[in-house]
Amino acid sequence: MSPFEIGIITGMIWAFALVVWTLTEITSGEPSAWLMLIAYIYEGFSFTPRGILKGAAWAFADGFISGYVISFIAQWFLG
């Protein structure tokens, strides 16, 4: 797989995980400190439907960049 494909997959997984995590925390009570930290880091991410979509967009971008860079470096080292 190319670094681009790995970046897309990683971004999708992190965005999906963040949405599920957020919805679980909202329905079970008050959000955890870790989720509040992510809300602080991702601008616009809040516990509203629009805020969750903004957080998912940030999570996708974050996951894509991380997956792309890590797979690019790994493939560069491994040849």
Image (cartoon, rainbow, N blue to C red):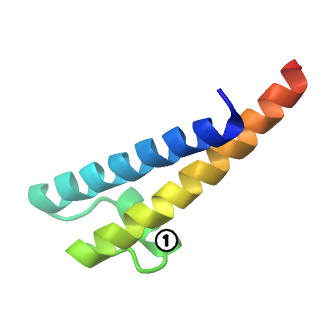
Horizontal relation, residue 12 to residue 78: left or right: left
User: Quadrant of the rendered structure where residue 56 is?
Assistant: bottom left
Tell me the quarter of the picture where residue 50 sits. bottom left
Q: Look at 38% across and 74% down and name the residue there.
A: 45
Amino acid carrying label 1: it is: Tyr
Q: Can residue 48 be seen in this view?
A: no
Secondary structure at badge 1 equals: loop
Q: Return the residue found at the far top.
A: 78
> For mark 1, does the 10 Å Cα neighbourhood hold few (<14), some (14 to 19), or many (20 or more) residues?
some
The quarter of the picture where the N terminus appears is: top right
The residue lying toward the viewer, choosing from 33 and 65, is 65
71 sits to left or right of 5? right
Residue at horizontal 72%, vertical 38%? 70
**Residue 52, image x, y percentages:** 30, 68
| Rendered position, 38 above or below 73 | below
Return the residue nearer the eye: 41 or 49.
49
**Horizontal arrangement in the rendering, residue 71 relative to residue 10 (left or right):** right
Point out residue 72 in the picture as x, y percentages from the top left corner: 78, 37
> Does residue 18 appear anywhere in the picture?
yes
Determine whether 22 is above or below 52 in the image.
Answer: above
Name the residue located 65 percent from the left edge and 52 percent from the top edge: 65
Q: Quadrant of residue 78?
A: top right
The residue at the point 34 percent across, 48 percent down is 16
Q: Which residue matches tag 1?
A: 42
> Residue 79: percent from the left, percent from the top?
89, 20
